[in-house]
Image (spheres, rainbow, N blue to C red):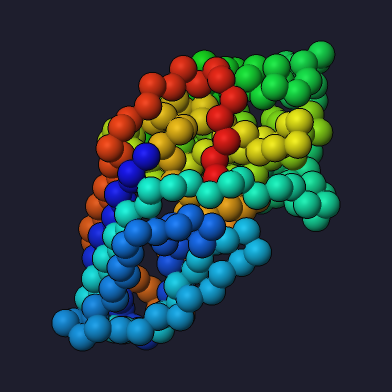
Amino acid sequence: MLRTVSSHQELDLRGRTEMVFSIAVAATWPTTSESLDFVLDGVPQQSTELVDARGTRLHTLIAGPGRLIVDYAATVEAAPEPAPLNDFDRVEYLRPSRYCESDVLTPTARSQFPTQTGHELVQAVRDWVSHNVRYTPGISASTDGAAHSLLSRRGVCRDYAHLTIAMLRAKDVPARYASVYAPGLSPMDFHAVAEAYVDGAWWVVDSTGLAPRQSLVRIATGRDAADVAFLTNHWADLFLLNLSITATADVLPSDDHRSPVQLS
């Protein structure tokens, strides 16, 4: 499957600031073409790439003040083999995290899913979150976690993913957060999904049901959104003036969100 992705950002930097971008396709994915450009007031800027053990690629840049234009584009064809779980992952992805308060939600998860295990549990959690949370653009704040989403019953993809992960961890299933490019998503944006570790493999869980899982392209992997934000900055303020994302596939699969699917 041939997938083409891109992102365009326009930023107003109010002073000299350090920025960290997580917008490039994960290092585990072979790209047939790729470009990443930073231009401040018409002058090209050099970034530094950092790659973590899971293949997440971060690009750091110190620049400003001024108008920064960030353009990324990549074409990927063959998906890599999914990475196996290691012992450290199993410990890390069972722990509560900032946005996935599995310890707080353990009584709820045990009450709601008393007997289910394995893939049956993953599907039950996915269906419950999908049916009990209403997708509401612009409703959630950057500080909202899974417990807030459970109470408000509204959110966007990050909130669906956080609640799904928290419920799974509360039932002793390792679960993690992935930011992705998502062909078929409407409206188009960066997308967030969960992954659950069952029967020796990671399985992607999208409780929003907004895009086919088979066409997703991984950007970053972490405990929750705190680990995979597409942009973080330090020092001076900055303002995001424009953000546009594209993600297309030559063949868009049909997905009933009931069959197990892996995200490479």
Question: Residue, x 62% and y 53% (percent of image)?
Answer: 222
**Residue 18 visible (yes or no):** no
Residue 38 to residue 21: above or below: below
| Residue 184: percent from left, percent from top | 32, 33
Quadrant housing residue 125: top right
Left of 43 or right of it: where is 160? right
| Percent position of residue 201, x then y | 70, 37
Extreme residue in the left direction: 42
Q: Residue 233: percent from the left, percent from the top?
A: 45, 71
Whether residue 76 can be seen here: yes
48 in relation to 123, above or below: below
The quadrant in which residue 114 appears is top right
Q: Nearer the viewer, residue 201 or 24?
A: 201
* Residue visible at 66% across and 38% down in the picture: 202
Residue in front for this viewpoint, 147 or 96: 96
* Left or right: residue 25 compared with residue 126: left
Residue 6 image offset from top left, x and y in percent? 29, 55
Q: Quadrant of the N terminus?
A: top left
Q: Is residue 98 left or right of residue 263?
A: right
Quadrant for the C terminus, please. Answer: top right
* Labels in figure, total: 0
Q: Nearer the viewer, residue 250 or 161?
A: 250
Q: Tell me what residue is drawn at x 54 percent, y 74 percent.
A: 50
Q: Residue at x 24, y 83 (%)?
A: 44
Q: Is residue 108 above or below residue 144?
A: above
